[in-house]
Amino acid sequence: MIRLALLSMVALVVTSVQAEVKRLVIGNLDNPWRDWGSFENIDDTSKPGWIQPRRTSRDVNILNKLYQEGRLWGGEKPAYYKPGDGRIWSPNAPYQQNKENLPRLADGAKDTLVFDYFNRRASNKGVTIYIDLGAPYPVEEIKFYPLHGDLDPTGEHSDLYMKGYEVYANDGSPETQDEYGRPIYHLIAAEPTNTEVVVTVEVFPPQYIRYIKLRCTSPLPFELDQIEVRGQGYLRHAVFTSKIIDLGDAANFGRISWSGTEEPGSHLEVYTRNGSDRTVLKYYMINDIGELEELKGETDEENRKRWLSLPEDARGPVVDDTENWTPWSVPYDSSGQVIFSKGPRRYLQFMVVMESDVTTNRSLMDSLVIEYSQPILARRLLGKIFPREGVPLGDSVEFKYKVIPKVDRDRGDVGFDVLRIRTPTKARVTEVRLGDVPLQKDEYRVEAREDLLEVYLLGRRVDSDDDSLEVRFKCVPLIFGTVFEGMAFASWVELLGQRIEVEEVEDLSVQASVDFLGRILGHVRAHPKVFTPNGDGVDEFTTISFVIFQMIGEAPLEVDVYDLSGHLTRHVLPERPAKVGLYEVRWDGRNEDGELVPPGAYLYRIVLKGDKKHYTGWGIVTVAY
């Protein structure tokens, strides 16, 4: 865990008295990445100050490198297995052979016989050896052989090569796994009557490979001394995971920004999570009476060491701490987005994932900046909205939006005087209450836009537990489930806003009446139904209005007017993309040529062209002179 106050390389000081927006910089030469987290297939030396995926070359045996680094395990995954570690195993060999001898197929010592178990079997047809490189590597060559050449002058071992084989591979991506997460292998080489002592499988064109399956197709005995896997290029998948960053006290988060490069065929993604304690995992032991007991160390590493020291039958599950930590966010679309957080949190962790589909290209990152502010507005700001169920779509509904504060003035909480609420349509405020007391209209100010309502308290603040703030407003819900997200701000000090939290997921979520399930187009009407486009300035046009709700994305929309014989009179709204919303379209009583139409009744028709179905609405208006 990183405690900011203890790190001199960070050009900031965490205090609880100075209210300001701070910037935490990680990366470049001043704040080396290595000081801030752990690497999985990450290289921070080729370009000082930057991180990028590791690169392998043809002169490196990937399996041997894993072995030399102590990251190649035989048989089942040990408890101390970490992402990026390699494994080698055979379902046809006993436990001890898997654990001790199979990893030595990558030890690089070509002067000793490593694996002769299959020299002692009656039939070896179907014997299979599996290799997991721990990550997708660019592979160009796979080689395997017994003891041979000068190291076997009698030829006793050289003749025990694999007389028939098949080699399969898998890149480790989710798309190439079955429903149980097992690799679906594809064949890259086969020789039913092999005569080569040293088998070299050329992988052309080079491809990313994580899993290798070597299957013997001959019943004859064989031995193996070494297996080599080589290739050249950048690893497909590389991850930097930060340590848990301790901001010293709860903070509100602003934007996360980074400086990096994505070469063609590569991309990088950034994720965050935040929490209220120092551990992101829960480790359990099985006590003497068979119950699960949580280990209560101060850090994950402390709990992990204690968990590993337990007998295997006393090790309980290890799970994410969803009580005190958010899950990993979805990847941020781009640099400069606001960090996701349920509310103010003291601890933060981030992850940088680099991927490439081209072995010669990679993405790089120079630095990453986290924006945050202290002190916070309140320990918590809990929100509730009413009503929450059975509301009609497309009609104006009055809502009560209540914010219940938990303010600790002794810890520096400053309170707030501005509330922003995301609304599906433009809202109109009917009442504001502070501490359940209605405010006069000169005690607050309202600004409303199509999707945002802002309420400013004038000369008043929410700065104690008794100062609940309630805003009553009317707006038109448009989708079956609408979440009214909120943020609070303190206008008198330069601090970031604070998210309105919920105790229950549905506290700020509004559900429509079940009558609206499946409805997409509604509230079709025209006003006035009779209009007189005669130039006197009264009722010169009719307004065709309608609502599109419960639609994901956009769909083509058009509005046309026809005479009663079915002939097109006017494209009032030529086809254009439309999404959920309230719509108003005017018709001035003219045809396609711009001429006034004869008096009489006309049909207006609205068509929304969904992927699988067209949704239509229509009505009649009358033109009179």
Image (spheres, rainbow, N blue to C red):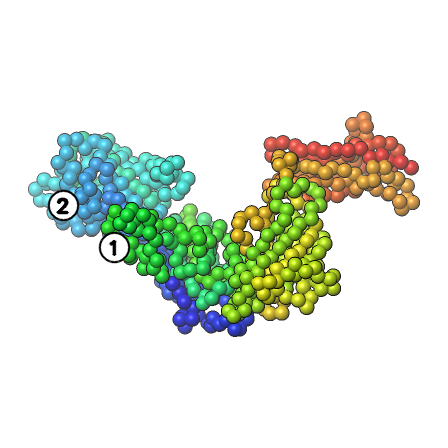
Q: Look at 39% across and 39% down and name the residue there.
A: 176
**Image check: 145 left or right of 597?**
left
Quarter of the image that includes the N terminus: bottom left
Q: State the mark number for residue 309.
A: 1
Residue type for callout 2? Leu
Residue 389 locus on image (x, y percent)? 61, 43
Secondary element type, mark 1: helix
Label 1 is placed on what type of residue? Answer: Ser
Question: Residue 573 is drawn in which quadrant?
Answer: top right
Residue 34 picture quarter: bottom left
Comparing 431 with 310, the one in front is 431
Which is more toward the observer, 133 or 162? 133
Q: Is residue 84 visible in this depiction of the protein?
A: no
Q: Is residue 55 left or right of residue 94?
A: right
Location of the C terminus by quadrant is top right
Residue 158 left/right relative to 90: left
Q: Does residue 563 appear in the picture of this structure?
A: yes
Specify few, some or many for label 1: CA neighbours under 10 Å numbering under 14, 14-19, or 20 or more: few
**Residue drawn 60% across and 62% down?**
466
Which residue in the structure is indicated by mark 2?
A: 113
